[in-house]
Image: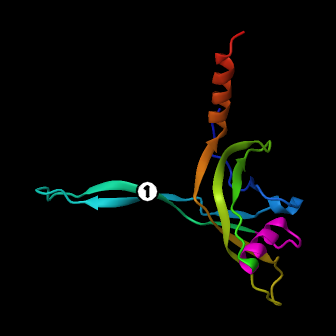
């Protein structure tokens, strides 16, 4: 039997934020799960063939979430509180890639996200399209959580318990 790569259209985004509505879990697109290592360049005396590149720190891109506009969303209330009242409440976000049985295959745990930008798509009387809102989040870092590592960790913990 062949293992195929997972599909990218079955995912779940959850905010550790209250209050929430059922529509707060529905997104049509997630982008920006990127990490890049910043490098310092070091020139060694007497070595003219190359320069050393040493890792400095990880830099995480902003995450952009897109979905149809929903009225009364807890996420939008959180964004409005930040933009209108300048009250930024960092929240953790989990982005999970799901299989056909709706079970997470892998997840990204985003730490201390705050809203950076909120935008609404253009209104156009000549198009028949849904109004899409985009939410851009800045955050500190993310951890990748694989289901296999959790399952093997639970199995090894269970195996080490003896009666």
Is there any visible trace of residue 119 in the rendered image? no
Please state, as top left, top right, bottom left or bottom right, where the C terminus lies in the image. top right
Q: Nearer the viewer, residue 159 or 65?
A: 159
Q: Nearer the viewer, residue 34 or 38?
A: 38
Residue at 77% across / 74% down in the picture? Answer: 81
Is there any visible trace of residue 108 in the rendered image? yes
Residue matched to label 1: 57
Residue at 71% across / 76% down in the picture? Answer: 86
Residue at 79% across / 87% down in the picture? Answer: 123
Please state, as top left, top right, bottom left or bottom right, where the N terminus lies in the image. top right
SS for callout 1: strand
Residue at 69% across / 21% down in the picture? Answer: 158
Q: Residue furthest left?
A: 46
Colour mode of the rendering: rainbow
Question: At which x and y percent is residue 150?
Answer: 66, 34
Question: At which x and y percent is residue 114?
Answer: 67, 66
Q: Is residue 74 left or right of residue 55?
A: right
Q: Is residue 158 magenta?
A: no
Region of the chain picked out in magenta, as a range: 67-84
Question: At which x and y percent is residue 23?
Answer: 86, 62
Question: At which x and y percent is residue 46?
Answer: 10, 56
Q: Quadrant of residue 37?
A: bottom left
Q: Main secondary structure of the magenta part?
A: helix
């Amino acid at each position: 039997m062949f293992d195929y790569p997972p599909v990218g259209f079955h995912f779940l985004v959850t905010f550790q934020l209250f209050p929430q509505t059922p529509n707060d879990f529905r997104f049509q697109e997630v982008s920006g799960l990127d990490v890049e290592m910043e490098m310092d360049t070091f020139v060694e005396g007497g070595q003219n063939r190359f320069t050393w590149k040493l890792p400095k720190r990880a830099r995480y891109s902003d995450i952009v979430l897109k979905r149809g506009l929903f009225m009364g969303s807890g996420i939008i209330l959180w964004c409005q509180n930040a933009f209108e009242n300048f009250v930024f409440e960092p929240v953790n976000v989990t982005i999970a890639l799901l299989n056909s049985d709706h079970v997470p295959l892998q997840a990204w745990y985003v730490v201390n996200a705050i809203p950076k930008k909120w935008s609404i798509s253009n209104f156009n009387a000549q198009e028949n399209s849904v109004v899409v809102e985009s939410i851009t989040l800045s955050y500190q870092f993310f951890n990748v959580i694989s289901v296999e590592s959790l399952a093997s960790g639970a199995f090894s913990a269970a195996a080490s318990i003896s009666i």
